[in-house]
Image (tube, rainbow, N blue to C red):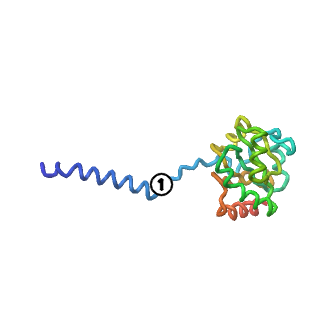
Amino acid sequence: MRRLLIWAPLALFAIIFGLVASGLLSPADRTVKSALIGQPAPVFDLPPLMPNKPGILSKDFADGKPRLVNIFASWCSPCIAEAPQLMALKQRGVEIVGIATADTSEAMLGFLTRNGDPFAAIGDDRHRKVQFAFGSAGVPETFVIDGKGKVVLQHVGYVSPDDVPKLIDALERAK
């Protein structure tokens, strides 16, 4: 019995090591998914953030055209990283509307000047109410809205070059 007790700490270490290693090799998906997938986009009316761009009315999402809704901010580093991909999507004819969270028009003007402007409209979500209504917890986050105003895809995090085909496919299916 005494011999077994000597090996108990090693066995306990091996068990703990195995649990930690298995968690590292196959981590759980901790992405918070929007409960709106397959549901109508939230109802909202955002005033324009920029004087030369319109705001966003959710009722306009039911106009028959699928579009991307990009929740972003001028102070967001990953938003800068996704800017080239959003510009490429715009050049392919994708309509992108932006929901600017916790931002100012002055800061946004600098952001758009430095990184390009892919947005047909930019709504001012200063207090993040619409962001949270979409089920979004951070920026950037992109949603595909079908022509009837229903959320069909949620993309958490910045849009990388590898993500562009997935978004284009979702937009095609959303027609």
Secondary element at tag 1: loop
Image coordinates for residue 64, horizontal then vertical, percent: 84, 55
Q: Nearer the viewer, residue 152 or 141?
A: 141
Count all numbered tags in the image, as a single digit.
1
Q: Quadrant of residue 99?
A: top right
Image coordinates for residue 142, horizontal then vertical, percent: 69, 51
Image coordinates for residue 1, horizontal then vertical, percent: 12, 49
Circle 1 crowding by C-alpha within 10 Å: few under 14, some 14–19, many from 20: few
Q: Nearer the viewer, residue 123 or 52?
A: 52
Q: Residue at x 40, y 56 (%)?
A: 22
Q: Quadrant of residue 90?
A: bottom right
Left/right placement of residue 27 relative to residue 112 reads left
Q: Is residue 102 above or below residue 159?
A: above
Q: Residue furthest top?
A: 127
Image coordinates for residue 24, horizontal then vertical, percent: 43, 55
Q: From the image, tell me which residue sits under label 1.
A: 27
Left/right placement of residue 42 relative to residue 65 reads left
Q: Is residue 93 above or below residue 122?
A: below
Q: Residue at x 66, y 54 (%)?
A: 81
Q: Residue furthest left?
A: 2
Q: Quadrant of residue 130?
A: top right
Q: What's the amino acid at mark 1?
A: Pro
Quadrant of image for the C terminus:
bottom right
Q: Is residue 122 above or below residue 127?
A: below
